Image (tube, grey):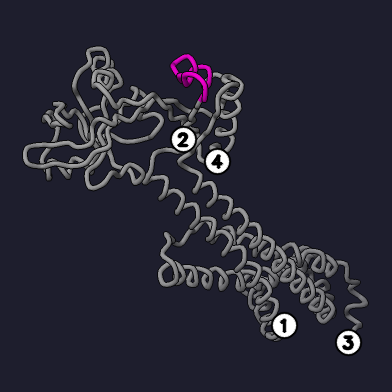
């Protein structure tokens, strides 16, 4: 006859407390392993959130190639080349053209004046950068075809020139050129320009402005940050094959983020190794305590079997003891690592951190897996005890 659950739990608890030192040492082994696992997951989460914050402050990850020919004109990366690039390289999400307009350096609205970085862009500029329009609209085909003197400004320049007023449909003067503002775009950390901001215009209108208009460069965005390395190599290879006489250089706005990811991988691998070793040690401790418990309670096992307990019930009791120790050590480990991580990210270094139920669940899952896995074979041996011999033992 099987024991009721309350009685089973009481028996399990009494068995563990009777050997409190051995139980404590076993739980400590689990604590070390689960603590390492929890710390690894927290570091991964913090690093990922830091990278996401940096990504939010800049344009989407992209590469920008530069081609130079020493003897002769530089090749133009026109629409045909861009289309060929996109057809040949799967990592490409979008390609847009962008050029600096060096003849425009300041913008003025009434009595307000600010330094600017003026650039012309293609109609798919938002696709490659991921920028959001905060007010108004982006350029359309009519703006391009009709050479309209319209411009976009970023939020930083809008604040500098208009001081809280809406800039839409207002005219500013950029080094004497009258431009009507049709939209405000979000500012990014990599677009800051002095105390002013950034200004964009269409490629066609930029060609109207005499002098200082640079040759086109292109921005090639990837589907994800992790593809930037492959994308950079693929673009470099493609352009070297297409223009063998030219020097090719490929720059990315995400090189520092890729370095952060590499550091994260190394740190995670090291901590994972430590965690696995600690979990193995904890598992060995659980296996030892289960083996000792089976040997010490042989007569108890025989009595329980004699009065009707099944093999599964006997085995379940020893597995339950191991799981309780694992849960106890794992819960303390998760709580401790959480407290230490919060203290480290607020006192030692400033970093984004919040408690992750997912990480806690994974850590506790590792604890339970160690408890069940390490106790299974010793608990299975308990079911093989000969009832008659067990009853005769001292």
Q: Position of residue 125 (x, y in %)?
A: 36, 28
Q: Position of residue 133 (x, y in %)?
A: 27, 34
What's the distance in space between the residues labelled 1 and 3, CA to CA?
A: 22 Å
What's the distance in space between the residues labelled 1 and 4, CA to CA?
A: 47 Å
Quadrant position of the N terminus in the picture: bottom right
Q: The residue tagged with tag 2: helix, strand or loop? A: strand
User: Residue visible at 29% across and 31% down?
Assistant: 102
Report which residue position mark 2 lands on: 62
What's the distance in space between the residues labelled 2 and 4, CA to CA?
A: 11 Å
Q: Which mark is first along the chain, 3 or 1?
A: 1
Report which residue position mark 1 lands on: 22
Mark carried by residue 226 = 4
Q: The residue tagged with tag 3: helix, strand or loop? A: loop
Number of callouts in the render?
4
User: Residue visible at 54% across and 29% down?
Assistant: 248
Q: Which mark is first along the chain, 4 or 2?
A: 2
Along the line of sight, the residue nearer the viewer: 126 or 219:
219
Quadrant in the rendering for residue 190: top left
Tell me if 247 is positioned left or right of 158 in this view. right
Q: Position of residue 110 (x, y in %)?
A: 6, 37
Residue 107 highlighted magenta (yes or no): no
Mark carried by residue 394 = 3
Magenta-tinted stretch: 69-85
**How would you rate the neighbour count of disc 1 (Cα within 10 Å): few for under 14, some for 14-19, many for 20 or more?**
some
Kindly check if marks 1 and 4 are in contact, taking CB atoms under 8 A apart as contact: no
Residue 82 highlighted magenta (yes or no): yes
Residue 1 appears in view: no
Q: Which mark is first along the chain, 3 or 4?
A: 4
């Amino acid at each position: 006859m099987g024991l009721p659950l309350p009685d089973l739990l009481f028996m399990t608890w009494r068995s563990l407390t009777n050997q409190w030192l051995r139980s404590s040492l076993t739980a400590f082994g689990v604590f070390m392993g689960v603590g390492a696992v929890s710390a690894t997951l927290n570091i991964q989460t913090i690093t990922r959130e830091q990278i996401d914050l940096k990504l939010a402050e800049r344009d989407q990850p992209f590469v920008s190639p530069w081609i130079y020919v020493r003897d002769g004109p530089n090749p133009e990366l026109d629409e045909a080349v861009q289309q060929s690039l996109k057809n040949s390289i799967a990592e490409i999400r979008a390609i847009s053209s962008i050029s600096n307009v060096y003849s425009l350096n300041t913008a003025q609205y009434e009595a307000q004046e600010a330094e600017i970085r003026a650039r012309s862009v293609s109609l798919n500029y938002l696709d490659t950068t991921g920028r959001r329009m905060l007010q108004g609209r982006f350029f359309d085909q009519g703006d391009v075809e009709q050479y309209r003197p319209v411009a976009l400004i970023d939020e930083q320049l809008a604040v500098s020139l208009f001081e809280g007023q809406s800039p839409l449909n207002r005219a500013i003067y950029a080094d004497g050129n009258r431009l009507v503002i049709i939209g405000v775009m979000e500012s990014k950390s990599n677009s800051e320009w002095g105390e002013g901001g950034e200004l964009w215009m269409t490629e066609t209108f930029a060609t109207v402005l005499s002098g200082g208009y640079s040759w086109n460069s292109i921005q090639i965005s990837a589907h994800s940050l992790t593809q930037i390395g492959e994308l950079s190599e693929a673009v470099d290879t493609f352009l070297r094959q297409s223009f063998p006489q030219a020097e090719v250089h490929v720059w990315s706005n995400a090189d520092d983020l890729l370095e952060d990811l590499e550091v994260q991988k190394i740190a995670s691998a090291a901590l994972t190794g430590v965690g696995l070793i600690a979990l193995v040690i904890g598992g060995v401790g659980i296996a030892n305590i289960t083996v000792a418990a089976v040997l010490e309670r042989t007569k108890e096992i025989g009595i329980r079997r004699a009065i009707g307990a099944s093999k599964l019930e006997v085995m379940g009791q020893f597995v339950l003891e191991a799981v309780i120790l694992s849960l106890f050590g794992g819960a303390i480990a998760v709580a401790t690592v959480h407290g230490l991580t919060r203290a480290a990210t607020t006192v030692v270094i400033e970093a984004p951190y919040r408690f992750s139920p997912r990480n806690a669940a994974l850590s506790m899952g590792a604890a339970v897996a160690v408890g069940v896995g390490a106790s299974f074979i010793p608990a299975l041996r308990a079911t093989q005890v000969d009832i008659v011999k067990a009853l005769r033992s001292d």
